[in-house]
Image (cartoon, grey):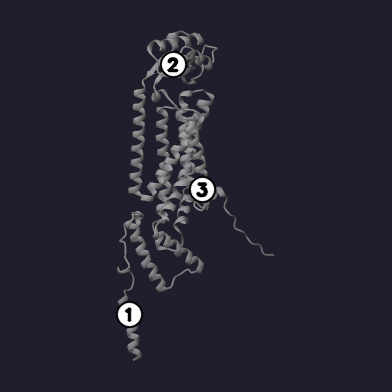
Amino acid sequence: MSTKQTEKRPSVLSQLYRGETNFQFIANRRKFYLASGIVIAALAVVMVFKGFVLGIDFAGGVQYAVPAASTSASLEDVENAAEAAGAEVGTGQVAGSGDGRSYIIRVGELESDQSTAVRDAMAAEAGVGADSISVSEVSATWGAAVSKQALIALIVFLVLVSAFIWIRYERRMAIASLGALAHDIVITVGIYSLVGFEITPSTIVGLLTILGYSIYDTVVVFDKVQENTAQLLKSRNQTFAEAVNDAVNQTLMRSINTSIIGVLPVAALLFVGVGMLGVGTLKDLALVLFVGMIVGAYSSIFLAAPWVVDLAERSAAFQRHNKKVATARAAGEKSEKPAAKAADDEDEDDDRLELAKTDDLPLELLEEPVKTGSAPRSGPSRSGQSRPNNAKKRKRR
């Protein structure tokens, strides 16, 4: 009785660890586009109709910190007292815990006597001395200056990132990375509008942080894409989309590890620090980091790399290459006839030259001399190939 040993197929986790998975990210990219489009459209509606809760640093106004450790008054009671005194309450939150617990009440701009009246009303409601309530005033002009500086920082960041990717990689990769960053920004700020968290300077710092994280993950994927496609036009084994899909699968484990390592401490900060311990001053930073890291990992895998494929396949050079791959597969040929091979070599040179002119050629190919159809090729010369034929003719005579 003969026994056949069947080779055990590695598990998905083992394939993932080795970068041997074959998930069809590129083939199913339209589904990911649709999912992101639906989410962005829904959040856009939320942003338009619900708006944002701007912190005192951006909107201007007065902030009161009311000690709440020894009072039985709730946050809502203190807010009602402030409104009864003539203030327009913007937001209120509980900060700290135990003896350091306090109510943070933010109201619009007030005159000096109005501010004093509001403080006295809240102190009476909370049963604390008026002097124990700290008051911070921020003018709307200063808040506008902060907003302007935040916008400038964001623009500078995007310009520098685009320039780096354009120089280091390719133009289409710079365009795709900007699209992914825009996707991350819209979803993150849309979540802020949805949950009603305040937008503070901490939010802006967190937003710039997660954009840096997102571009880092995207660059890792692009680096592998460039490696896989550097010699693509010299073979008939893969299309550009297939090479990019392999690159995403090969870097998938690294992307997952990076995301988990980054998200876990942020999740602890958000759910434990803010949710359980009540450290309300951390929630602005924690939420933007938590949402941004998850969305950034998603966009680098499911959006940035597929967008590179869409942009590349608009090039006539890659369109011709894909047709050659399809023809070779249909014919089932492993090797080409000499005449067909020579013609393909000339087309390959034309494709590489076209990509070099349109700034779509990978750096590895730019380092090699770009050949043209009339340039000499390696191997035996044409004149060397004709001499044996002439010698045979003379022998026949």
Label 1 or label 2, whichever lies nearer to me, is 2
Task: Out of 128 and 56, give the one closest to the viewer.
Answer: 56
**Given contact means CB atoms under 8 Å apart, are the residues at marks 3 and 2 in contact?**
no
The residue that disc 1 covers is 386
**Given contact means CB atoms under 8 Å apart, are the residues at marks 1 and 2 in contact?**
no
Q: Position of residue 266 (x, y in %)?
A: 48, 32
The kind of secondary structure element at disc 2 is strand
Classify 10 Å Cα crowding around label 1: few (below 14), some (14-19), many (20 and above): few
Q: Position of residue 171 (x, y in %)?
A: 36, 50
Q: Going by the picture, which residue comes out furthest to the bottom?
A: 397
Marks 3 and 2, Cα distance to the nearest angstrom?
52 Å
The kind of secondary structure element at disc 1 is helix
Task: Out of 73 and 215, give the one closest to the viewer.
Answer: 73
The residue that disc 3 covers is 17
**Given contact means CB atoms under 8 Å apart, are the residues at marks 1 and 3 in contact?**
no
Please determine whether, in this image, residue 303 is positioned above or below residue 277: below
Q: Classify residue 349 by image quadrant.
A: bottom left
The residue that disc 2 covers is 64
Q: Position of residue 93 (x, y in %)?
A: 49, 21
Please determine whether, in this image, residue 214 is positioned above or below residue 243: above
